[in-house]
Image (spheres, rainbow, N blue to C red):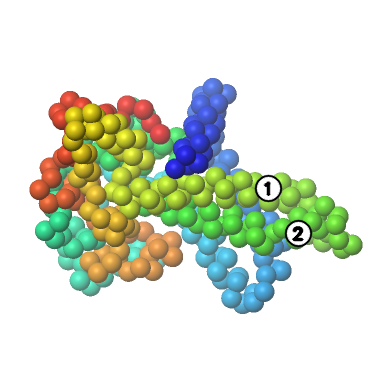
Amino acid sequence: MIYAKQVFRCFKWLERLGDRLTGAAGPVFVSLAVILLSIGVVCFFEIVQPSLPLCWLSTPICVLIAVNMFMHYFYVCTITPGFVLDPPRQPGSGLLWAKKRKTARNRTLTGVRWSEYMHITKASVTKCNRCGEMRPERSHHCRIWINQCVGLHNERHFVLFLVYLDISAFCFAIFGWRHVLLGLGWFDEPWTFYSPPMAFILTYILAVVIFLAVLAMTGWHLWMVASGETSVESQDYEHYRKLARGRGETFVNCYDLGKGKNLEAFFNIGTDGYPFYTLILPLRIMPYTDGHHWARKEGYESHRGVRRGEELTDEDDE
């Protein structure tokens, strides 16, 4: 957890530096991310991928990982999180949209089986200081990665982008080290690739750094999803737990339905949701709820251990 917090502090420092230099950190980081990802993919498929064993098997897998990485980043940057004044969304059609399971196709809210442990309640509303839009609770603004709010309709794509980015960087680091030595002249072999050796070496170093940094972010986000929290809520809940302990009470997160149910609801998979292949194919799906209502523990309308007036507002963006 300490490792993850240090990584986030580093990203926040970079964000503030970008704002001071350009006045618009979000677009700068998004453009830089697209450029660096493209360079990394070109170097991998030109230099590393042809040397992998079982090309007939490894090539489709590598292509699938790269496509997932780019598509989920495209989704998270272009799909709005779902603002209060937006019209109700309907599932799309075509190759990019997954089909619901037959048991869930006629349900207004799909994804998890509602039981005695959870029920639907209305969501509160906050205003994003950056976007200027009214948004349901559990949304927040993110400049450093996607330059817009993260919420119901695009947070799933953000987490999956982190997963596939980390897998891509790991593959680059594991399978590309010999070509780094080749570029440094350790072997008596010519460099026969179009990409300059120094460009490949710098890209390899960047891949290793990204793997270590994003690994912390990915693990932290998946743990928060399993805990029924968002990144902003995770920070708020630490404050709530201190307040509750000071009164001899215990803070209870009303959104925490259990690790398994939380993951099912977030990714909208399982018996009453979409098929599991939506996790390995870059397809769009509808969330389990409309964003104006959220699943909470049975008997909970709000968090336990937090009194009226003590809840923090999302005034600062991520």
1 or 2: tag closer to the N-terminus: 2
> What mark, if any, has residue 3 been given in the picture?
none
Q: Amino acid at mark 1?
A: Ile
Q: Is residue 119 visible?
A: yes
* Residue 150 vs residue 257, the one in the foreground: 257
Query: What separation in Å lies between label 1 and label 2 (alpha carbons)?
Result: 12 Å
- Residue 58 in the image: x percent, y percent? 60, 72
Question: Which residue, given by chain and number where applicable, does mark 2 sit on?
Answer: 179
Question: Which residue, given by chain and number where applicable, does mark 1 sit on?
Answer: 205
* Residue 243 vs residue 129, the one in the foreground: 243
Which of the 4 image quadrants contains residue 262?
bottom left
Q: Amino acid at mark 2?
A: His
Is the residue 102 above or below the residue 42 in the image?
A: below
Numbered circles on residues, count:
2
Q: Is residue 194 visible?
A: no
Q: Residue at x 53, y 54 (%)?
A: 166
Is the residue 151 above or below the residue 53 in the image?
A: above
Q: Residue at x 13, y 60 (%)?
A: 115
Neighbourhood count class around disc 2 (C-alpha, 10 Å): few under 14, some 14–19, many 20 upward:
many
- Residue 287 in the image: x percent, y percent? 28, 55
* Residue 247 vs residue 264, the one in the foreground: 247
Question: Judging from the image, what secondary structure is the residue with disc 2 in?
Answer: helix
Q: Residue at x 51, y 39 (%)?
A: 7
- Residue 3 in the image: x percent, y percent? 50, 41
Question: Judging from the image, what secondary structure is the residue with disc 1 in?
Answer: helix
Q: Please identify the quadrant where the C terminus is shown.
A: top left
Q: Please identify the quadrant where the N terminus is shown.
A: top left
